[in-house]
Amino acid sequence: MFDIFQRTVLDGIGREIYSQYSEQEWGDSVNLWGLTSSMETTWGKVSTGDWILFYTGSDQYEYAAKVSDKEQNPDLGDVIRNNILGVDDDESRDWDLLLVLEDPVPVAISGHEVSELLDYGNNFPVRFIRVTQSRKEALQEEYISVDEFIQKIRTDDAESVA
C-alpha cells in the first residue's frame, strides 16, 4: 500500500497525464488518492478541508494530507491504475473516485493511539474509513480541532496548519 501512496501522493501525478483526462488545473503535479466505486457513499461525505491519515504499516501513521478537491473520473483512475500503478485490467478494483490532496505532511502516531483516541476496534484501518461526527467530537475533547490534532502529531516542526 505504501508504494501506491508513494507514486500517487508523494510523487504525484504529472500534468502531462492528468490534463488528458480532467478539465481541472491542478498545477505541474497533483497529489491524488483513489477510492473504488463501492466507496461512493463514503467518498461523497468527504469535504474540502478534511484531513486524511495514511497508515504505512508497522502500527504507524506517517503522513497526513488535507483534501482540496475531489473528482469522479473513471478514465483518469484507469490510467493511474494501469499505467502508473501497474494493476491489471482484469482486477475488479477500480479507482473511479479521486481525492485531490494538498501536499502531505509527515506525522507520527501509532495505530494503537488512533484506535484508542477514536474508539476503534483495530489498530490499523482495514479500508478507507471516514471518522464519524461523534468520534470527531471525542477527538475535539482532547484537541480543540482536527487541525490542532494534526499539528500535535506533525514531525516537521511546522508552526501552523493552513
Image (tube, rainbow, N blue to C red):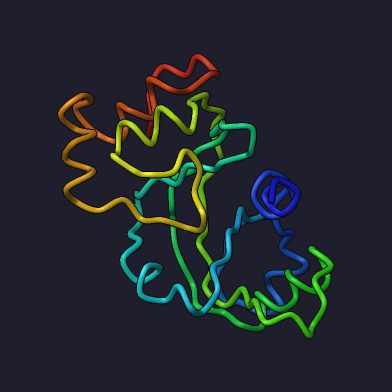
The picture quadrant where one finds residue 93 is bottom right
- Residue drawn where x is 69% and y is 51% of the image: 1
**Relative to residue 155, is residue 85 drawn left or right?**
right
Which quadrant of the structure image shows residue 25? Answer: bottom right
- Between 112 and 78, which is closer to the camera in this rendering? 112
Q: Determine the image quadrant of residue 56.
A: top right
Residue drawn where x is 68% and y is 44% of the image: 10
Q: Is residue 109 above or below residue 44?
A: above
Percent position of residue 30, x then y: 63, 56
Above or below for 108 versus 78: above
- Lateral position of residue 10 relative to residue 72, left or right: right
**Residue drawn at (46%, 66%), measured in percent from left and top?**
70
Left or right: 87 as drawn, with respect to 144? right
Quadrant of the image containing the C terminus: top left
Residue situated in front as seen by the camera: 132 or 34: 132
**Residue at the (64%, 38%) spot, across then down:** 57
Residue 79 image offset from top left, x and y in percent:
75, 75
Q: Residue furthest front?
A: 121
Q: Is residue 51 above or below residue 36?
A: above
Query: Percent from the top left, x then y, of residue 152?
Result: 38, 20
- Count of number-bearing discs: 0
Q: Position of residue 138 (x, y in %)?
A: 18, 36
